[in-house]
Image: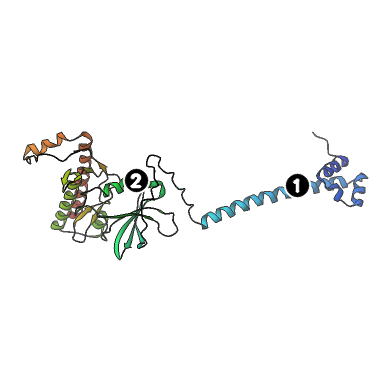
Amino acid sequence: MLPAPTATSISMMLGCLGLWALLPAAVQGCWDSDEPGWESIWMALVLLGLVLLLLLLLSSIILALLQRNACRVQGGPEPEPEPEADPDSGRDWSAELPELPELCFSQVIREGGHAVVWAGQLRGKLVAIKAFPLRAVAQFQAERALYELPGLQHDHIVRFIAASRGSPGPLPCGPLLVLELHPKGSLCHYLTQHTSDWGRSLRMALSLAQGLAFLHEERWQDGQYKPGIAHRDLSSQNVLIRDDGSCVIGDLGLALVLPGLAQPPTWAPTQPRGPAAIMEVSTLDKRKAQDGGKDADEVVATVRQHLSRLGHC
């Protein structure tokens, strides 16, 4: 057990701290006189002062942390850091994207893993705005490249309007895809809110199959080459309903351009019939057949979902 500190040792400690000179002369005299009781009283006061000092320091740290968190909550989410420029591209993603002052954001339609789809207006017309965060610039560039392929315009493929940059409100400026808006929403939403007869159901199924067949088709038209495209993410969430009740295919974020012809064909083969038409699938590239088969399975599942709902009406 350590011996109790004496008055001399405590006075030396106070002297080191610079507090001994601040004490009144009467107190210093009483301390040096070794009068009983003074030593224990001053020892308690010193310990109490140290405890109060530690509590004050701890409370200051806690208060600073609370103020920092409060400022972070009031200020909203911290802006994402600007992504580094791709050394292979040699240019900034936003350098070639114009701003559209006439573009207005209205409300969120759908939130996905890489983008948020808004309903908005451009020059007085309703549009869908697919807003990408800065971390998803690569996904934006890939999807934009698909929409800008020559010859991709089709009645049953969502129409691409423009690529731009901007943001709703105070959010960081990011890349945007401006697309045609279909107010009736997705096929999934439509099936949960409406019923249809066999005629309307067949119209939906036929238009969906026509859109998918166009995506898969590889063609030369008017000097422009359109490669075959596998959607790879076809579902009732990514199929939209037009005003006339037909379907359009959207969301090409995971679509893949299939390898094919590099030059226009010099001769037009006759269209096979019967078993020969089925045999043609074996001439496709292995990846092309796999991706196309996946899209076909998804179409069957989507149509089956619609027909099952129709059977319960």
- Tell me if 53 is positioned left or right of 241 in this view: right
Label 2 – label 1 distance at C-alpha = 59 Å
Taking depth in this image into account, of 218 and 10 the one nearest to the observer is 218
Q: What SS does tag 1 mark?
A: helix
Residue 123 in the image: x percent, y percent?
Answer: 31, 64
- Tell me if 230 is positioned left or right of 45 in this view: left
Taking depth in this image into account, of 174 and 201 the one nearest to the observer is 174
Indicate the quadrant where residue 254 lies.
top left
Mark whose residue sits in front, 2 or 1? 2
Indicate the quadrant where residue 8 lies.
top right
The number of numbered discs placed on residues in the rendered structure image is: 2
Residue 222 in the image: x percent, y percent?
Answer: 16, 49
**Looking at the image, residue 285 lies above or below residue 68:** above
Which quadrant: the N terminus?
A: top right
Label at residue 221: none
Q: Which residue is mark 1?
A: 50
Please give the name of the residue rendered at 34% of the width and 46% of the height, measured from the top-left corner: 139
Amino acid type, residue under disc 1 in the picture: Leu
Spot the residue most to the bottom. 124
Q: Which residue is mark 2?
A: 139
Please tell me which of labels 2 and 1 falls first in the chain: 1
Q: What SS does tag 2 mark?
A: helix
Residue 88 in the image: x percent, y percent?
Answer: 38, 39
Taking depth in this image into account, of 66 and 312 the one nearest to the observer is 66
Please give the name of the residue rendered at 71% of the width and 47% of the height, measured from the top-left corner: 54
Amino acid type, residue under disc 2 in the picture: Gln
Which quadrant: the C terminus?
A: bottom left
Taking depth in this image into account, of 222 and 234 the one nearest to the observer is 222
- Tell me if 202 is positioned left or right of 148 in this view: left
Crowd band around label 2 with a 10 angstrom C-alpha radius: few (<14), some (14–19), many (20+): some
